[in-house]
Amino acid sequence: MPTKLWLHQEIAIGRGLSGPLALFMDRGTGKTRTTIEIIHSLWEEGKVQRVLIVAPRRTFGVWRDECEKWYDWEVLTLNSAARRTPAKWTKLARDPKPTQPRIAVINYEAFIEERTWKRVAEIPFDLVAFDESTKIKNSKAKRTKRIMGLVKHIPYRYILSGLPVTNSPLDLYSQMKVIEPNIWGLTTEWSFIHRFAVLGGYQHRQIIGWRDLDRMTEIINPHCFRVRKEECHDLPPIVFEQLNLELTGSQLLWYENMKQRFLIEFEASGGKLTAANVGAQRVRLHQVTGGFLPNEEKKYVEVDKNPKMAAAMAIIEELTLAGRQVVVWCAFRPEIYALERECKVKGITTSSC
């Protein structure tokens, strides 16, 4: 049985049942659970059968685990490899009376890949939710244009973000059009810029500031539910969030080899990495998931792109942009160095010990 909802979640669910809604909720306030409860209520009312969740791949495990945790629902995860799983698409498209809502989770890149995009467009979804909706803030991007075409035919539409504005108010233009296509009463992004931006610079076409932000807020407020963590007085002191990430292909191969054979072989250099006992094996397995392994000179090298690094940076960016401080514990120094490099690229100040 589902546990008791927090007050702000109950309010958000009540508003979400009425139709499209932007869920602008801080990290840790339960956006995923709130969305799942909206889906459940609408499914029980017979209003939705097929649900599309669009999310970064690193959050696939969160959606799968949360749906299973609260309602024992099966979730089909379909990324760029979905073309190799036609049975999943058939199940989504042809099951007329499912015993549970048919839920598919895809990544944003699916709207760029032609074959996957065509399959998505063919399925009559009743509800769509965009997790980390700032991914569609660029109205000129191919995936944003295709998303705008798709949502026209879906009655229940939701966008989820803890930080909907990362650069400027222009970030809201495309996101809010998913909720209400005519929300701005303007035909183009340039019209939006002329309405709310202060222009100057070369040929008077560069944005140098913004105006009438109170009016912008008035426009979006009826279509948004906004809550900050400090406003949620019934939240526990500490909210734990577990992210389950998928290993890359090479990481998975190395992990299985070390687990079964106590050995990793590097094809490029012809070198080998071994573990003398179970204790050493566990350290090696931890290193594989971290994306760093010692070479024959006992120096750490980055052997693969690390999904954990991308997930950590997404969290760090979101929290620092919101003015929060972040403490990160790492298992190995190379992970610290990698995070420091990534933070430097993003202009985030760091210190380590």
Image (cartoon, helix red, strand yellow):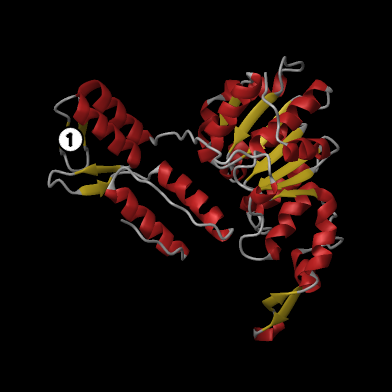
Residue identifier under label 1 = 273
| 87 lies above or below 6 | above
Percent of width and height locating residue 349: 43, 64
For residue 16, side relative to residue 267 (left or right): right
Q: Quadrant of residue 267?
A: top left
Residue lying at 24% horizontally and 34% vertically, measured from the top left: 284
Residue 200 % position (x, y): 69, 83
Is label 1 in a helix, a strand or a loop? strand
Q: Quick check: can you spot residue 180?
A: no
Locate residue 228, reporting x and y percent.
Answer: 67, 50
In the image, 180 versus 4, the foreground residue is: 4
Q: Nearer the viewer, residue 119 or 103?
A: 103
- The amino acid sitting under disc 1 is Leu
Q: Residue 86 lies in what quarter of the image?
A: top right
Query: Which residue is at 81% across, 56% downward?
Result: 220
Query: What residue is drawn where x is 30% and y is 56%?
Result: 353
Asked if one can make out residue 318 in the rendered structure from this viewpoint, the answer is yes
The picture quadrant where one finds residue 67 is top right
**Depth order, front residue of 134/332:** 332
Instruction: Find residue 30 and report its horizontal and vertical position in percent.
Output: 65, 38
Q: Is residue 153 left or right of residue 250?
A: right
Q: Is residue 91 above or below residue 114?
A: above
Front one among 256 and 284: 284
* Dot 1 alpha-carbon crowd within 10 angstroms: few under 14, some 14 to 19, many 20 or more: some
